Every structure is written in structure tokens, then in C-alpha cells.
Amino acid sequence: MSERSTMKIEQADRLKALPPYLFAEIDRLKAEVAAKGIDIISLGIGDPDLPTPSNIIQRLKEAADNPAHHQYPSYQGMLSFRRAVAGWYGKRFEVDLDPAAEVVSLIGSKEGIAHTPLAFINPGDVVLCPDPGYPVYSIGTMFAGGESHTMPLLEENSYLPDLSTIPGEVLNRTKLMFLNYPNNPTSAVATRKFFEDVVTFARAHNILVCHDAAYTEIYYDGVPPLSFLQVQGAKEVGIEFHSLSKTYNMTGWRIGWVCGNREAIKALGKIKTNIDSGIFQAVQEAGIQALEGDQRPVEELRDIYQARRDMACEFLSNMGFSFAVPKAAFYLWVHTPAGLSSAQFAGRVLQETGVVITPGNGFGDHGEGYFRISLTVGEKRLEEALGRIKNLSW
Ligand SMILES: Cc1ncc(COP(=O)(O)O)c(C=O)c1O
């Protein structure tokens, strides 16, 4: 045996402290089902199936040819990209942003979300995290040595956290609160009143609100969701993460931004200067094209999701499933049939039909008893997948 293969470097405690990967069993079953030659349809991942609009791709091609874009970019993003973000926020939300101080580019919003606790959290500090929720909020907190406190998102509260239930002892140690509307995985949207209450609460308890707004452009029935920054006073207490990923089918491009409170943006910027060197400038040029160019592809995309949502909701309710019809985002958050846990139901559906759905408990304890379907597959395949589930009996 070589000396090299006997070497053992112990992993850091933060890796050992990661929660068990709840989708591991689904991955294992998926491989087993695929090995039997069964046609797998995945409704599991929130990754848009449609291509990036061609005008954006064209702009990347042209920009990639320009040697000015071949060197290190700045960590905070090209000013022209940050101006495009500010212009888009002005038009879409009537929110006024200073592109030089209130916007920083991110290598996808996930990067900024994961790094934010590093800028604010010391050991023993608390971060409020929604449950069910995007796992990066609590994992970023743990990597920074912080403690996350769960805010249950319950159906009876329209999947908005009840801030009055957070104990005073916790609030005394709380520095950050993560929120996400339109929400993954529940697809819930926030009301203006809720965002106003959050501003009051954050002021009273000196908490920085970190709102993840990745899904604001995927909405139904012509009713656009709010930005947290639209509410009076929000910029004093909060920042908002946004992304080109879902709006322009650009998940693979890795470009997003954070905007809002300038002190907070500066602090996150300090972390970023020490960790990364920004986004390839040609990608930022494409991002400018996305934000400033023709928005008809986004309208067409919404029409496509609307048709999928309408079909899937009708199908599921005819099958007797219970769920709230989403107003935004591209997920359906559905109760499992009585008596079956999230994992039992997702496991059976996969083994018996080849359809991948996400067990709700993968998003936290309060996701138990639910499953998530992503509308990021074509209507025909979606219909085929739902038809297979319909033929199951439980
Ligand atoms: C709620 C939420 N926030 C952020 C992201 C990350 O998006 P990106 O890093 O591509 O901007 C996702 C991706 O699925 C998400 O669901």
C-alpha cells in the first residue's frame, strides 16, 4: 500500500455537523429504478428546463470576444451591471438604489446567501431561518459558527412565520433573519402587511433582514409579487438577494446580486473581496442584456408556467390531493396521502412509477407530510408523470 493512501486528514467539525443528506435515499432509489430500464421523469429539481433567451446568449458571445473582459473582474461587479440592476429595480418595484453603494454582484444568489452570516455572525449569535426552507440559510449560519432558530411556516398562517412566537431570550442573541417570498418550497407569497410588520420587528430587535427574492418574476394570473424593499423603512433594516437564474433561465450562468442597506452590503463586500474575484465580465454583459433588453421572453415564460400550473393543479385536485394553488414560483406544495410520510410517499412514487418528487422533510421538520413538485418540465411530460401517479393506489 502506498504511503499516500494511508494518509487521513480529519474533516472539520463543520462538515461533520452537516445534517444528513435527506435526498440520499431518493438518489439511491433513482439509480435502482433507472437500472431496471424504467423511464424516469424528474419533478424534483427547481432548475428551469427552457433555454436562456437568444439575445442574452448573443451578447455573451460578443462580449467573450472582447479582450477587455478577459482579466479579473472587480468583486463588487461592473458599475454598468449594477446600474442595470438599479434601473430594473426602479422600473419593476419603484425602488431607488444607488448602484455604487447599494448593489453588489453575486456568483448566483446562493453564494451571497451562504456568505452573509460570515459577515455578521459570531459564535452564539442566532439567525432566524424559515422551516421548511432553502437549506443554505441554516447551513451558511452553521459554517459561520452561528445558531439557527427555526421559524415554522405553517399552512394556517399562509406559510408566513409568526414573529410573536420567537422567545425573547432568542431575540436578544439574534442578528439576522432570512425570509424568502415567493417561497421555496411552499410557493407562498408575502403580503405588504407582513413585510411592514417585519420592518417594525427588525427595528425593535435590531435584526438585519435578509430577503431572498429569487422567484419574484415567476408569477401567475398577472399579479406580480412584492419586493421587501418596496415597504417603507425596509432599506434601513434589510438587504434583498436576487438572481437572473429563474427569470431568464440562467441557472448555469451563476449571476445574481444583493441590494439594499449600504452598511450591510459593504460588510458582505468585505467578505467577498477576501474570497472571490467576481463574475466573468462577459457574463455580466449578458446580465445587462437580460435586465435592459426585450422582456417579452419573460412574459412568454410566465405563460408557459401558467399553463403547466393550471394543468397540474386540476390534475392533482381531481386526484383528491390537498394543496394551495400557488400564486408565484414554480412549485406545488402538496399534502401526502393520509398515513404516509413524505419519504414513504416519495419512495413509493419513484419505485412504482419512475417519477421523482421531493419529500417535504428535506426542507426541514415542518415539511413533513408534504411533497414538492417542480413545474420545470414540459407540459406533456408533466401530464405523463401525473398520470402515472394517478394509477397508483394507496
Ligand atoms: C429560494 C432560493 N434562493 C436562492 C436560490 C439560488 O439561486 P441562484 O444561486 O441560482 O441565484 C434558489 C435555487 O434554487 C432558491 O430556490
Image (tube, grey):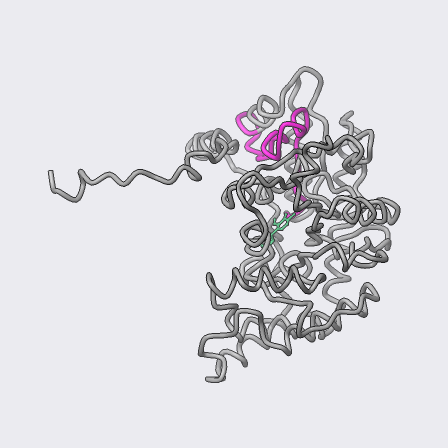
Quadrant (top left/top right/bottom left/bottom right) for the N terminus: top left
Question: Where's residue 146, x and y in %?
Answer: 55, 41
Locate residue 345, reporting x and y percent.
Answer: 61, 24
Q: Is residue 194 above or below residue 302?
A: above
Which residues make up the magenta segment?
A: 350-376
| Residue 371 inside the magenta-drawn segment | yes
Residue in the foreground of this view, choosing between 264 and 73: 264
Residue found at x 58% / y 44%: 45
Write the residue at 52% across / 37% down.
Answer: 39
Camera-nearest residue between 131 and 252? 131
Q: Position of residue 219 (x, y in %)?
A: 78, 52
Q: Is residue 310 visible?
A: no
Left or right of residue 276: residue 48:
right
> How many marks can you see?
0
Relative placement, left or right, of 234 versus 172 is right
Give the residue at the far top of this rendering.
339
Q: Position of residue 110 (x, y in %)?
A: 57, 53
The answer to whether residue 241 is magenta is no
Is residue 334 positioned above or below 199 on the image? above
Residue drawn at (59%, 41%), measured in percent from left and top? 125
User: Can residue 339 be seen from the camera position used here?
Assistant: yes
Please identify the residue farthest to the right as the structure is shown.
Answer: 193
